[in-house]
Image (spheres, rainbow, N blue to C red):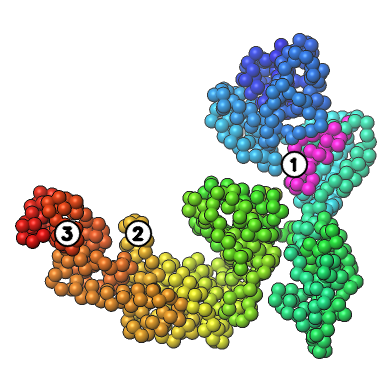
Amino acid sequence: MEVITSHIQADFDAFASMVAAKKLHPEAVLVFPGAQEKNLREYLLQASPAVTSAIVKMKNVRVDEVDRLIIVDTRQLSRIGEFSRLIGRQGVEVIIYDHHPVSADDIKGTRETSREYGSNMAIMVEILKERGIVPNAEEATIMAMGIFEDTGSLQFPSTRPEDCIALAEIIRWGADLRMVSQTLSRELSPEQVDILDQLIKNAYIFHVGGIDVLFTRSESSSYVEDFAMLVHKMRGMFEADSMFALARMGERIYLVARSTVPQINASDVASRFGGGGHASAAAASIKDMSLDKVESTLVNLIKKETKPRLIARDIMTFPVIALHMDATIDEASETLNRYNINAAIVQTKDERVVGIVTRQVVTRAQGHGLGPARITDYMIRDLTFIRPDAPVWEIRTLIIDGNQRMLPVVEDHRAIGVITRTDLMRIMHEKMAREEGLDYRSTQKKNVQALLEERLPRHVYAMLQQAGALALSMGSNIYLVGGIVRDMLLRIDNLDIDLVVEGDGIAFARALAQEFQARCAIHEKYKTAVISLPDGTRIDVATARLEYYNHPGGYPIVEQSTLKLDLYRRDFTINTMAISLSRHRFGELIDFFGAQRDIKEKRIRVLHALSFVEDPSRIMRAVRFEQRYGFSLGKQTLSLVHAAVKSGLLGNIPGRRLSYEIRQILSEDDPLLGLDRLRELGVLAAIHPDLIFNAAIRDNFARVRQTISWFNLLYTHETYRSWLVYLIAMVDHMKPKKIIAICSRLGLTDENIRNILTAKAKVGEILKELSGGAGNSPAFVVNTFEKARIEEILFAMSKTKSAQAKEMISSYITTWRSYKPPVTGKDLMSIGFRKGRQLGEALRLIRDKGLNGEIKDFSEAMAFAGKLHEESDS
């Protein structure tokens, strides 16, 4: 005998799975091991015989005659009633289909299909599809009820994409959603209303490890159906991370557990009382305990087992910036200023923490002329350490009640990080915002994994996952940073992959290159590396680093640092976001400096007041981003630009940086906007007094853009430098001496300067020749442009105002330059020509006649070649 069964108190997911299993095992009968939930019982009373005919009552089954037991929607021995006697019996095959996580009470089946979906029906649909089995409309409707009920109409946290996909397939099979709605939506009975009222009145929330846990209880002299449904209704009335509801009904106590945070596993808690379920939803039925005893045990269990939401390791700053105990007050001042911090720990040679020195103490000591004194004479010695797994409440107590402004996080007698008052205030601010009901979904951290999947090609997404797994194995944290993150939020395509490693970035880059079988170029000085994959993909890897400048506009000094300090060194807030690629935090968007707000408000904002002093070239970058995205400079940022221009800081920009920035601006889609803005801010004149952008040059730029747009639409895939075309247009009116002076200040190479001077002269000659009568000949045009660069040709087309000249240049680009005569050197050699100058001249002559239509085919070309042969002495 074959039997399909499920758990006691079967629900629609259990029954729907039994119906689906019947399609897979048509010889089996359906048997409930015990009672069903009220809603299912009422449905079965009015269901058609086609649905109920396969159901056999438990009392009519001879358990000892069963040789195949098919169990769905559970695998717990304690939940299958009398059928538990068959488990382990010789000759009995046990087949299991279950979506619950592993528990200590699990049955070991002969065959098992287990996937942690939101509903068991999702598993059954996948199997039916694999085998090409299509249920009828009535069966599909029952299956839809199973998914809707077990996922809370796809709203429970345990719902998975597979549940949604399965439901879509069921609808295709003909499920009647109107019937589903009528069956599952029901009015509350008076007994259920009473239970719900008790749950609401008895509810209380307590905080454990930074997590809000809701507890409630109710009592009834008899069993009341659908307690889990009542808990679900109540849950929407309260803001809590987890919820535990108890109900004493007759001689039993029922527990329903729900959790939305990983720190509390609902299944683990329920299993302590003999129950089970998922990490987010579980239940238990308890005997032989009073309600007070169960509640007390439950509360103590939650307090003991809950992992803190945040611990010291999560919020600390690292690596530690420390001073040696032999350092002087002046040296401490230099360190505090360099890293822009207000306090630093003091440690011995073996890295044992002995004190803290603050900016206040250092400044006052210098005021008293104590700069050469040792910091050990004035440091704070009375301090408390904290372990890495310390919860937030302990941190709060030490910093606020203990009045300790910096808290060293110590492991194995070494400081691995520090927690400051600012770190604590940020955590408390988020908590207060949540309690006050503000829409504060931490601007600092949110998960954008779905956005990563949406915006990135599949192979790039897989590479980032692989990089995160590698970093975890090496004990490092890794982040996707830079423009790719910014543009992802703006829904702009960008595949410039920049990774930052909290740890040894160079070691990580070497290991990642080995995994990808790629080349890796190392730059030790800046602690960076470039990985070049065989398919052309490039990955930039950098160690999280801090930069500081010895003088304005100079090149930075680089030291290893933390992610936050690494992001703080960047130019603008919109470029300071990072996405964690570590496996346990994959897709977490980190925004320390309000970048999301600035993107929303379309604002370019620097991170600190000395940003343009340290690197004045950032002004040109600010204008580039402002014009590219249609943003505007923030009020403070604009004021700092004016101050930098006025103080002459742009004269300190090294030529290489100027060259890079001007080329970037001239490579934008419409450089006219950027140059106009630089002129308006006085930046161009500050770089060089002769660098102007007047109406005539603006007109040149407009014509160049029109020409480049036309050329791009040809889709020739030809490489050219648009910035060079614009730069030629910008200096075309100048004399060579002035061009050399300006281009030298812009940091252009000697080769680039020669190209610009040559282009200016050559374009002038070309346009002069095209304006003559001979310019009507295609052969003449080809010979004229034969040795010209594409940038020179495009500039010539934009510069000329002659429609005839534009047409000839257009014909050259689109047709004439790619014309290949049908006669090859080999052909001509076969009739007597030697290699060399005469052969080349003959080929050019034949090509020109071909372009002009004088030679139309191969035979005419051969005849003409024969004529040349007769006239030649060779």
Q: Label 1: which residue?
A: 280
Expressed as whole percent of the image width and height from the top left, the position of residue 169 reads 56, 32
Expressed as whole percent of the image width and height from the top left, the position of residue 751 reads 38, 74
Quadrant location of the N terminus in the rendered image = top right
Q: Is residue 486 visible?
A: no
How far apart marks 1 and 2 lie (CA) works out to 56 Å
Mark 1 or 2: in front is 2
Q: Which residues are magenta?
A: 252-281
How far apart marks 3 and 2 lie (CA) works out to 30 Å
Query: Residue at point 64% right, 59% down?
Result: 505
Amino acid bearing label 3: Leu
Residue 277 magenta-highlighted: yes
Figure check: 507 above or below 634: above
Mark 3 or 1: in front is 3
Q: Is residue 430 visible?
A: yes
Figure check: 684 above or below 292: below
Q: Label 3: which residue?
A: 839
Q: Label 2: which residue?
A: 718
| Cβ atoms under marks 3 and 2 closer than 8 Å | no
Say left or right for 693 vs 463: left
Query: Residue at point 68% right, 66% down?
Result: 560
Name the one closer to the observer, 21 or 722: 722
